Image (cartoon, rainbow, N blue to C red):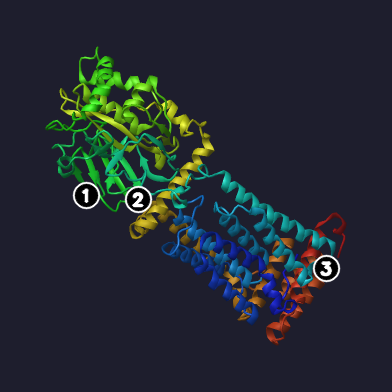
Amino acid sequence: MSEPSDNDVSRYGRLVELLPVFAALVVHAVAHGRWLLCAPVMVGLVWAGLTGVRVDYSPARLLLAGVLGLGTGAAMLWVSEPPTAPFPPNIFGPLCGALVGLSVLCGLGRNRYYAWTYAGLLVALSLRVREMRAVEWVLGGLVLSVLVVAFLEGGLRRSGFRAAAGFGVFTVLLLGMTLWLTRTIWASEGVLMDAVYRMTSGSNPGTAAEFQSEVGLRSLERKARGSERPLLVLSGAAPARLRTRVFDRFDGLRWTTSKELEELRLSLPPGDAEAARTLALTVLSPVGAWLPAPAGTRAVEGVRPEVRGGWVWKAEELEGTTLALRTAELEHLPPEEVAGDTLTALPEELKAELGPLAEELTREARTPREKARKLEAYFHEHFEYSLYVDLRGEGSPLAVMVKEKRPAYCTYFASAMAVMLRTVGVPARVVGGFAPEDNNPLTGATLVRERDAHAWVEVFLEDEGRFVAFDPTPWRSRDDALGLTQQEKGFWGNVVGAVGTFLREVGAGLRYQPLAQVKALVGSPLFGVLAAGVLLWRLRKGKGGGRTKTRREVMGTRDVRLAALYTRYLKTLKKRAGLVPAPAETDDELLSRLREARGDAVAQVAAEFLAHYREARYRGVPMGPEGNTLVEHLDAKLRETLSPSGRGLG
């Protein structure tokens, strides 16, 4: 079905033709609060339609429109961030902006089917917002706008049954594509590139990504599941745990960091003989002022952090950066001094409640390590993990949990074990950080998510002079409670995950460290290969494209539409008849070759087109719709001569 000419469409008809684009812009503006972007665009479309403005379509202009839309969408991130998406906002916002630019350009250029397709893609992405569940109504409105265009212009009535059927197939495909994309995006949340930012749709941004200065315990609590929000990418052998905060003071309900530990500045032991491994860490999202690092970290390249008491690393403005962590082969903390009784201090009531049980469980243990192992095994074997915590009863929350073996989550298990160790004289503290699990075997990269936030215990072993980690959390029931006991992703799932991780790293760099990221991309080997490929392609095109350039120079016309129509004529001859003009060959000589190859009937149609073309080219007579009609007729004639029934023609 051919595109109608400008002569067939009134100014108001052009506005009707743009209805699907208007519908997509309204949906996007409502869904994502992008009125500042969409409203001026819609006003511009109305003005262009009423004044008869038309933008000639070309691949270069299509690329320019996409780039401008991409840039505008990126700039809009500073005004309003998309509520939620299958990709991070720094990718999703520019992507929608590019679709706006593409649909508008194609709409103004009368490439209606391209415009409606881009509009359908924009609707599919915009409908991802959770608050907009009336998908069928929105899609129905989009389809209705398409049908209104068809009937008000009268195209279906004039075109007959075959054209109407073709238009119907296109409409069904457009609707199906939009609906399929919308449903696929919904169903693939957490799977397709695993980049859903639930924190942008209502969750507290500080609960898991950044540990607070204190950790409190309650008698009754329902903890929200950690989101799938990606925070870090680890490249290399992933550690069991990443440490961020250390809590050494406990009052019975709250863990805090003592002033002495907070103000302590440490220096790493001299010599890096132990730093046998390198771990690349890319920060995708804000994680606060504390750098997540494994216990064996000996040096950090890419930033200058402070080493605070408890061997935690403090650094700011980490987002979008990639750091190199030099770590020991084993996740061992450096030696540390323990002064005073802070690490064994407890309220007397709590000692009385949990001391006897701790003594009984560790009676056969001789060393602090053995006592820690006894208590760790006790929690693994007798407790269940749950995000719903009900510790109401007689006594403190920890005493109720331990004595009645009530379910809880990692903070409570770590607190209980640390307290019980203190009651038997073993110095212990609680540590907060992450326990990464999402490893991609294809790339070796590990994605650290918000849901991986974790707490455990560090026990001071006097004979070694350092703290050692123990984890009392029952992991099997934890994975069940968090829905992490899923089947393996398989090869293609890992491929999708690898692509998603790469896009996140690039997106985080462009958003938080744009200059550094652009510099890294330009300096990468991949960029060099692409640049060399483009250069070779241009050189080859320059050598082999002389024929096309000569023909354009011979045409010597500034009428872009006329040049495009002539190019379409040549492409038809090449595609259907295999005829390509020689560098010095005239139109009449090419016509003679066409007559010899396909007969007089086909050549007659081509000759008629050339007559109209020359009238327009040399006498300035406007080329009407008959130009397009003749090229289509020529295409049909050439196809007929290829069919068995048409072999004898001419």
Disc 1 crowd rating (10 Å Cα; few below 14, some 14-19, many 20+) is: few
The N terminus lies in which quarter of the figure?
bottom right
The residue located at (82%, 73%) in the rendering is: 604
**Residue that extends furthest to the front in the rendered view of this protein:** 394
- Pick the front one: 137 or 545: 137
Cα separation between marks 1 and 2: 17 Å
As drawn, 319 above or below 432:
below
Residue 531 screen position, x and y as percent: 44, 59
As drawn, 472 above or below 105:
above
Q: Amino acid at mark 3?
A: Arg
Q: Amino acid at mark 1?
A: Arg
Residue 496 screen position, x and y as percent: 51, 43
* Image quarter of residue 584: bottom right
The residue located at (27%, 44%) in the rendering is: 213
Q: Which mark is residue 304?
A: 1
Disc 2 crowd rating (10 Å Cα; few below 14, some 14-19, many 20+) is: some
Residue 206 screen position, x and y as percent: 36, 48
Going by the image, does 222 lie left or right of 323? right
Going by the image, does 323 lie left or right of 264? right
Tag 2 residue: 286
Q: Amino acid at mark 2?
A: Pro
Tag 3 residue: 157
Residue 86 visible in the displayed image:
yes
Disc 3 crowd rating (10 Å Cα; few below 14, some 14-19, many 20+) is: few
Going by the image, does 358 lie left or right of 406? left
